[in-house]
Image (cartoon, rainbow, N blue to C red):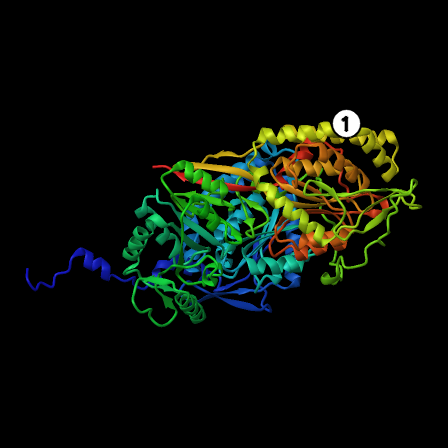
Amino acid sequence: MAGSSIKTVYDIFQSMEFGPAAASSYAVAQAWLDHHSRSLGLFIDGKFVCPADRKSLSVADSTGGDACRTVCAVDEDVSQCASSAVSGFRLWSGLSCHQRARVLLRLVGVLGQHGQCVSQLCELFGASCSSSTLVRLLQYYSSWAQLRDDLIPNWTPLGVVAVVVSDDCSLYSLLLKVLPALAMGNSVIVVPGRRNAPPALLLAQLFMEAGLPAGALNILNGGDFSLGVKVAQSPSVSYLTYSGNKQDAVMLCKATAGMGVPVSVSPCIGANCPFIVFESADIDSAVDGVIEAAFKKKKEVHWVLCVQESVLDRVVARLRLRVTGMKCVTLDSEEERLLVDAAVQEAQQQGATLVQSCAAPPPGAQYPPTVVCGAAPSSPFVVSPSPGPLLPLLTFRSNTEAVTLGNHSPHGQAASIWTEDLTLALETAKSLSVGSVWVNSHSVWDPSMPVSGHKDSGTCTDGGQEGLYQFLCSSSSSSPPLPRSSPVSMDYSKFGAAASPAVIPVDSGHASAPKSYLQFVGGKACKSVSGGSVAVRPPGGDGVLAYCPDGGRKDIRNAVEAAIKVQPGWMKKGLSARGQSLYSLAKGLEAKRQDIALSISAQTGVSLEEAEEEVELSINRLSDWAAYCDKIQGGSVPMPQSGSGFSIPEALGVVGVVLPDKNPLLSMVTLLGAAIATGNAIIMVPSQRHPLPVLTFIQVLQSSDLPPGLVNIVTGSRDQLTVALANHSVIKAIWYWGSVEGCQYLQYTCTNPLKTLCLSRQHHEEAKDGGTNWTRSRSSLMEEMWRKAVQWKSVWIPTA
């Protein structure tokens, strides 16, 4: 009808706005808060503790209003909590696997009664975690609690585990640490973020109702990460794990350096994740997916949209259509709005164009969903995006360029790939250096899928069976726990700068002169870049047994350059081909057994019979690694949803190893075999006291068919070379046997980028290395070392 004012259904829906949430929508959660007088204390020894003389902090709800206050723990509370956790561990670990599993399953029923309160608290405080997600977590880890002794034999719980999360971390990330720790028989001290504290306290209460022993789960609230440091200082804590933002992770690692407590971190907040759209993708589905992923009100990661040039116009047109009319996203503060405005202005100055839901962004702490088209990969708003609803859009031409863009970020958390070509999807997923890959989907999380932090996104594995091992210890570990101690007072800038052993000119032309050895870099035996040599003393310390190169930072740099050239090709090499190369190495060692046995005897002072026995064990160990290459691999993961999940163990990259004094040959081939059998390249620093067996082994490497640069050996001052390894950004992991100061230096320094550390202290006066038994059962030793040499990737492919 002409002039009719009747609106269509489309018009009505376009004009609809979200109304204010009714007060009754959180009625159950509000009632629980009122029951606690809106002042939440600590949860220690199975009950709430709310000391009156403690400082308290306000906790804002999702609308910005003050919903309650939480008490901040002090040293006295930490001490009481640690004592409670020790008692709780004795009770909890003393139960059978079946009894622990029943408690976790009983919590599923308790959660059914109080699920509404849990969901409302999570939503009220912006720590969203649905009841169905909690049930899935509990069911999964209760089954592992039931089967621990059968499927993970010879591993025992650590004891007291501290779980620290930042304020912006999700409750799911918190529980992905707490539940497996409990399932394996540990007691747990949780230091939640401010917004996670209310739902975490409620869950602790529900755990008690389900039958968890008092003290097995404790909650300490605090103002910042410093409370986590106080918890780590307690001698009762055996392990500390962290989830949250990178800044707090770095500060926590530095603050706990030298305490003797292992620390692992999962910086799951603020990472840049590629959203790759190929020309073979279903464009409509891909655009729907990126809109849903990038413009959520609360998101833990930043997405970068990468589109193939051939479909760029189609993607932009659909983005423009989808973005138009979208409601503005509420920011946390006016300061965030200023950061967003500055990022948008900078992008426009660099020639980028905007696709926004409205022509003029409204004032205040709101901003419309915005796609920044024409961005360059190196632009600051792409590398370090602002917290607002901004989506950078990059373009690529070929599949190789797409992988390069996806790996451009220093983060390695996740990626989303959109294509109907399964071969292309799997090739791209394998080439991306990230922990999770979703094909034609995004943000699919399930506890059955193991995920490691690649590059700068973590030093541990969460989820799946592999994620359980961080909460267990082997009965005969290759790197026994560091003894608890107070940090050594040291100047980190001067560590390794002390004068190395005097450089001695070598008179190689004299018939009676001690032999001069060479190091091994890039497949060639060579002198140090400095050209100097140091004297190697016999066991008694009198005279000179030989001379070896006095390597330094430049030698490590050259070794890393050689390693990074060859490692990708070695990683792609067939598993059987790797095994054949290791068999060849064992055969070469067999041919040189007499020479190497003599070097072991002369260097360490053991009898020739003992030296020959070590050579024989080393030959067998290399053969074991050759056979191990294709025996333990990932596979399909049973998923509760329709689709297929795969777990894939991947090489770390370049591994730096500072070798121990004890069993210089056997320890070397054990670590060498673990690294190259799993696809890594390796840079080894021989024992400063006993370098000759490793230098003699260079003859074996020269006659092997290993690619040049895969194995590198640099001799010299252990501390100086440790500094060089720690400060090289390419090296992903460092396995270190050395001094107290060296362990502390690595814990403090290896944070930017993050490096995976395996540390053990040596007692030089006894020529021992902290209890490592290199001759022990080969199966347990090799399984442990194999897990330290790989990182995990999960790939999720949905089906209709």
The C terminus is located in which quarter? top left
Dot 1 alpha-carbon crowd within 10 angstroms: few under 14, some 14 to 19, many 20 or more: few
Residue 433 shown left or right of residue 347 in the figure:
right
Foreground residue among 780 and 667: 667
Res. 79 in view: no
Residue 320 percent across, percent down from the top left = 29, 57
Query: Number of numbered discs present?
Result: 1
Look at the picture and state if 378 lies above or below 106: below
Residue 747 percent across, percent down from the top left = 67, 54
- Residue found at x 74% / y 50%: 483
Res. 74 in view: yes
Residue 74 shown left or right of residue 341 in the figure:
right
Examine the image and state in which quarter residue 18 appears.
Answer: bottom left
Residue 342 percent across, percent down from the top left = 43, 69
- Farthest residue in the front direction? 509
Amino acid type at mark 1: Ala
Foreground residue among 338 and 88: 338
Examine the image and state in which quarter residue 517 appears.
Answer: top right
- Residue found at x 41% / y 57%: 123
Q: Which residue is mark 1?
A: 591
Foreground residue among 679 and 562: 562
The N terminus is located in which quarter? bottom left
Foreground residue among 155 and 89: 155
Residue 618 percent across, percent down from the top left = 75, 31
Q: Secondary structure at mark 1?
A: helix
